[in-house]
Image (cartoon, grey):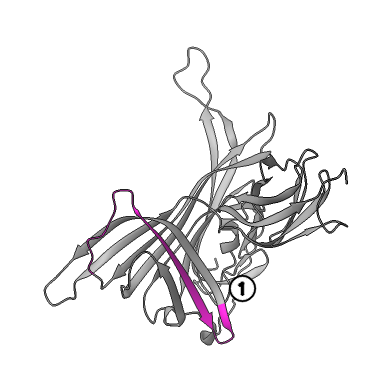
Amino acid sequence: MAYYSYNNPKVTINGDTVFANKADISMNTDLSPSFLAGDRSSFSNVAAGGSQGSMSVSYYLTGSDPLKKYITDEKNTITGDFAGLSFVSGYLTSLSFNAQPFSPVLVDAKIDFYGNLKGKFNPSTEQIPSNKILIFSDAKINESGIGKEKIKNMSYSFSSMIQPMYAVGAIVPSEVRFQRKYSNLELLTYGVSGELDYQGQQTSVNVQLNNLTGLAEQYSVEGPLLSRRTTSQAGEKVNSTLSITQNFIDEKPVLTSITTTGNAMALGGEGFELHGSNLTNTTSMEVGDRAISNFTVFSDSKVSGVLALDTMPGSHKVRLTTYGGTDNSKTITVGDSGL
């Protein structure tokens, strides 16, 4: 009988190797005992739901986080492999890390998947170059709303609720519905302050992790300051713990330019394009007081729309809304189609 040590199993996410500190993969079935009339015992079971599993993994960052984009890109599935055992229909349900000065960036993540595992256990070893691991001493923290407090350490967490929907006769979900999501950031600081409005104080924190070539990854949380706790202990500095929670799943959209199709100015019924960033999850667009019912998302930086036929001539604010918020900083000039 063969035994395997912790350095044998190789973990990959979407085909890319992650340098895992630990990994756990599990499968569950949803079975119910079948009782016949008059019987007190059951000798058979029936499936009440499809097979599902989860993979929990802790991995060191050596560059960009392979799972961070799924915080917002929720509809695309994740593939994973644990020493030859693989799945193809995974969804990110949690991601977190704790930040300590001079410590490596170790991310804890959980992926839920549906259907059976495929493949065969096949141990292999992958060595991690020690000089590639990101450490929090190379981090830059930009903040607003929490004052000039010196940050001792911090913890970040993301959580997502998903619900599989099954069709009659199907053993894998025909649809996965995405429900509430939130991000939370706790900061342990050396600052002392009693400021905390009953409605919460609006704050934002952006954590940038750098390597030798520049920015490698960043995490952001924007929302109300929910709590502030100040503690003291003999021989220790007085410190405060701040907690910030974000209840939307995306970064705010940013519009940089507008182009029209074939005319110096747009006309009712004609198309236009919006350019910027964080546009992937666009949910609605308006020009002036008219909703744009016909729009297409091409990428994170480009969305096109068609003006309503009855859009009045003149200069109008363009309003674009995503899961992360709204940008109405740009205007479009609509011409008179009768001229």
Is 210 inside the magenta-drawn segment?
yes
Q: Nearer the viewer, residue 334 or 177?
A: 334
Instruction: Provide residue 101's location: percent of width, then percent of height.
Output: 37, 79
On screen, residue 326 versus residue 271, left or right, reads left
Q: Residues within 10 Å of mark 1 (few under 14, many from 20)?
A: few
Identified at 57% across, 31% down, the residue is 48
Q: Which residue is painted at 46% across and 50% down in the image?
A: 247
Amino acid on which disc 1 is placed: Ser
Residue 60: x percent and y percent?
50, 73
Does the rendering let one see residue 70?
yes
Q: Quadrant of the N terminus?
A: bottom right
Outermost residue, front side = 339
From the viewer's perspective, tell me whether residue 122 is left or right of residue 107.
right
Magenta residue span:
192-215
Res. 172 in view: no
Which of the pair 9/113 is nearer the observer? 113
* Residue farthest top in this picture: 38
Q: Which residue is mark 1?
A: 124
Where does residue 148 sit, x and y in percent of width and height? 32, 73
Q: Is residue 204 above or below residue 305?
A: below
Q: Which secondary structure lies at badge 1? A: loop
Q: For residue 293, which quarter of the picture? A: top right
Whether 135 is among the magenta residues is no
